[in-house]
Amino acid sequence: MVLDIVFVFVILFIGSFLQGASGFGFGLFSMSFLPFMFTLKESTLLAVALAVVTSLTILAKVYKHLDYKALLLLLSSAIAGRVGAFFILHNFGEMDIMKKILGFVLIAMVIYILSSRNKKKVPYRKVMVALPIVMGFLGGLIGGIFMTGGPFFVFYLMIASRDKYSYTANLQATFLITGLVTVTLHGLGGDLNSQFLFYFLVGILGVITGSRLGMKWFERLSQDQIKKIASAAVAVAGINLILFS
């Protein structure tokens, strides 16, 4: 039991540190390891609930940089995606095959992140209206099932945001609101139990500490290096989920 608590705490701490330092990564990293201990549904709900805490901690520092224009369409579509994700996770989240699917999703996300990190930004006015709708829905749907929808939000917000502070603020607001939608829907659906509450309480200290420490490195740490290290860990975990779950 003690080792389980330490395992969960360390995973959540590292994931929240990555998010504090680079703007995202909590869901990707946490969902690479939590399914080795819990079902997909339990892992996703724990990660989503603690992502709300992580995002709120970071957003409290950068909320003044929010760009509501860049968020409107993205958030609307992401919420629609989360509603769809609720029905899938609620009904199929206990199946072992979902862990293998998660493994493939994780590897796909790694390829996506590494292949898109050098894309040039373009002014907001040149971004098609369809882009935030598509990216928002995919991020909401995949994030609500596997908690790995962050890269879709990142792709759009890196284009649409004014600067890195606006990007971080918008991203955390997106994670916060979509996370609240997911937790509320599953709470009403009866998916939150005493085990969830216990590990949620265990994880709160880890995510607050990790995200605050990560934010201290926001100015000086290379986000590219963070993404490479995190991507390597996620890829290994994804392969393990495919082969051994």
Image (cartoon, rainbow, N blue to C red):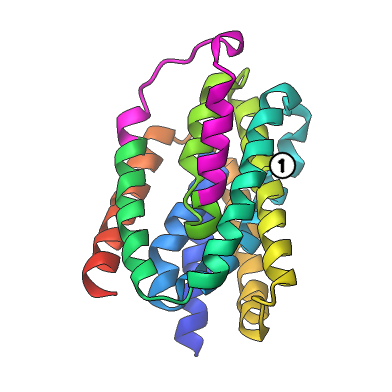
* Residue at horizontal 38 percent and vertical 41 percent from the top: 227
Compared with residue 187, is residue 156 higher up or lower down, i.e. above or below? above
**Is any part of residue 147 visible from this angle?**
yes
What amino acid does circle 1 point to? Answer: Leu
Q: Position of residue 176 (x, y in %)?
A: 69, 48
Number of numbered discs visible in the structure rendering? 1
- Badge 1 crowding class, 10 Å Cα cut-off, few under 14, some 14 to 19, many 20 or more, is many
Foreground residue among 66 and 44: 44
Q: Residue furthest bottom?
A: 1
Compared with residue 90, is residue 3 higher up or lower down, i.e. above or below? below
The residue beneath circle 1 is 59
Compared with residue 203, is residue 37 higher up or lower down, i.e. above or below? below
In which image quadrant can residue 65 be found?
top right
Foreground residue among 199 and 101: 101
Foreground residue among 164 and 239: 239
* Residue at horizontal 62 percent and vertical 42 percent from the top: 78
**Is residue 133 covered in magenta?**
yes
**Is residue 70 covered in magenta?**
no
Q: Position of residue 240 (x, y in %)?
A: 25, 66
Q: Look at the numbered disc 1 and give the secondary structure of its residue.
A: helix
Range of the magenta residues? 114-141
